[in-house]
Image (spheres, coloured by chain):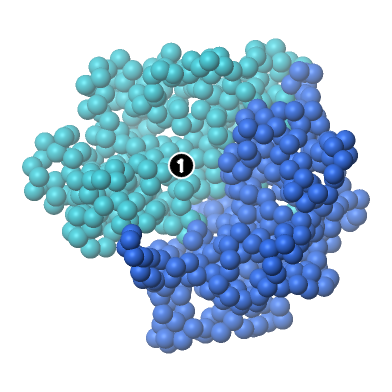
Chain colours: A cyan, B blue
Amino acid sequence: MTKLLEIENLQTHFFTSAGVVRAVDGISYDVGEGETIAIVGESGCGKSVSALSILRLVADPPGRVVGGSIRFKGRDLLQLSEEEIRDVRGKDIAMVFQEPMTSLNPVLTIGRQLTETMQQHLGMSREQADARAVELLGLVGIADPARRLKQYPHHFSGGMRQRVMIAMALCCNPKLIIADEPTTALDVTIQAQILELMKDLTRRFGVALIVITHNLGIVARYADRVNVMYAGRIIESGSAHDIYHDPRHPYTLALLKSVPRMDRPRQARLDPVQGQPPDLTRLDAGCAFRPRCGFAAPGCAVQIPPLAAVGAAGHIAACWESGRVAGSLLRAS
Amino acid sequence: MTAAYATDSAVQAAGATIRSGGDRSPQAARGAVQAPDLVTVRNLKMHFPVTEGALIPRLVAHVKAVDGISFTIRKGETLGLVGESGCGKTTTGRCILGLERATSGEIIFDGKNLLALDRKAMNALRQKIQVIFQDPYSSLNPRMKVGDIIAEPMLVHRTEPDRAAREARVRELLQLCGLNPRFADRYPHEMSGGQRQRVGIARALSVRPEFIICDEAISALDVSIQAQIINLLEDLRDELNLTYLFIAHDLSVVRHLCHRVAVMYLGKIVELADCDELYNNPLHPYTQALLAAVPVPDPEVERRRAHQIVKGEVPSPMNPPSGCVFHPRCRLAVEGCARTVPEFRELRPGHWVACSVI
């Protein structure tokens, strides 16, 4: 698979009055053409900031990309001029945000919001863009698209708005779509509809997809590869099978063990991750997960563990004690 | 573990391990509860008027947020109330709390109909009924210290008139909820989401309630924190013999925590059964669709599973479909479903369903 996106040691920091927040603290990963990558983590782990950094959408100040490179089809996005990156946004790389309620402009019709991008990026005439908009709305499963184009976002339900967002993302035939918590604001039955739609369309058009989520369940069905983030770093990365069946980082293991599961008998008691998420302004030289970790050893306080190969090919984890973590999930279930 | 990091989490671990000492097998913890009814809701309706015109408002319609629901909650039991946004589950909780004036029906608590009580009698009884809200950020006053937040219900209900006794009770409650007693002098913004939710729980417990409405009490929390709060709620239930109405949309959490579950759709209860019965043998097509939509964190299970996706979206409660409100989205719907409102009937012992086809 040819590499579409290569992120190398990306660092995005926020300079606040409380100190420097190392929201993204040196992450590296690749996305192949047509591949679906999941980035999983809790609020504040840096997953959204890392995605916004790709399109240089982090507000400056207070945030700034302070290091690393993001190569998209060989070009470093961080080196592009403001004009060049604007040409990439929405055309080569599109984004679907979490909040379908706030990410559409309430005073423009759905049609205008769809055609604007196409006229801008593809140089289409108004008529061409309108015709393509009708086609796109039909594609994402909106009935009576010609009439719906003339309506405003408030005429659409949450699920319908998210379909519109997906149509907007697809309108310039992007190579990559970044979806930041695309279904978090939606109900379960609608969530399933939207996920199936995204999977189907990205497959059909060979679009690569980065899905950012806090919900381990929703990506299990779709992701080729899963990156787990904690405190600004990728702490484990592997195929969906590796991550869900053979986690080698104590945080991944703890997350999997803490959620009640519908496909298993009821447990007497849940097994929570102890403690609180870390304060990103006060990280020390050691592993950030160590205060909450059941496997922590004295060495963990000394140095941050690097990502190292574990288990199957392509499976990496950043833990000094990953050897002891292996097999824990099997023993637990 | 280094000492600097360890303090807070150690206190929390200590708080999280309060146990009732009794049998903790799943059956004992969550089998059917045999006890008298504490709460009985009968044919509860909450219709919000919709008006048009600024100067002379004209009634144009009603939003039937809750449209004739009935259920009971036994003492010591946890009843789960699940459904998608807009189904009326939160409004039901607000009606029981007296935060909305129900249009009609009965809510019997401890033998008294809450809807017939005057304000004074209701206020007195409200001490027994407390609530834990969804958002631990907006449900705590940012200008009040944690200690004052927890003490406020005791002042309102005058349960601890003595200041020293009140402060002692605050410390006791913080400890009970797995927080360090010195948190009493902190402000909410100094705490994480999980810690704030513990404060919300301590506040609800401060006046020794019998019945607590948990309105999406864990939905806003991070995955790693949710299990901590679920365990805390379970421990408190067992230790203090509490009764919960657990309003939630996360079906796997409801399955873990509840004895019985009611499924709501567009203001009506469509199915109600013991927890295991509902999850193992869902009868209503909507319940089946809801359960089928819950993703499981296992790629092999997920990729094998045939996705039975419910079509369409929830209609507006202002203009609900005729007959069975679910019929436009239902895979079993027949012609008659658009005409007749299905009767809520007991298909098996304790398993109630509102569907005329099955």
Disc 1: which chain? A
As displayed, is residue B178 above or below residue B260?
Answer: above
Which residue is depicted at the point 21% across and 54% down? A149
| Residue wearing tag 1 | A181
Which residue is depicted at the point 84% across and 58% down? B241
Classify residue B265 as left or right of residue A107. right
Classify residue B61 as left or right of residue A134. right
Query: In which quadrant will I find the N terminus of chain B?
Result: top right
- Residue B273 in view of the camera: no
Percent of width and height locating residue A283: 63, 17
Label 1 neighbourhood size at 10 Å, few (<14), some (14-19), many (20+)?
A: some
As displayed, is residue B121 above or below residue A324?
Answer: below
Query: In which quadrant will I find the C terminus of chain B?
Result: bottom right
Name the image quarter holding residue A173: top left
- Mark 1: secondary structure: loop
As displayed, is residue A328 above or below residue B318?
Answer: above
Name the image quarter holding residue B79: bottom right
Q: Nearer the viewer, residue A14 or A179?
A: A14
Report the residue that reaches farthest toward the front. Answer: B55
Total marks placed: 1
As displayed, is residue B65 above or below residue A82?
Answer: below
Q: Nearer the viewer, residue A91 or B73?
A: B73
Classify residue A95 as left or right of residue A257. left
Which residue is depicted at the point 39% across and 23% down? A59
Percent of width and height locating residue A91: 24, 34
Percent of width and height locating residue A263: 63, 57
Name the image quarter holding residue A134: bottom left
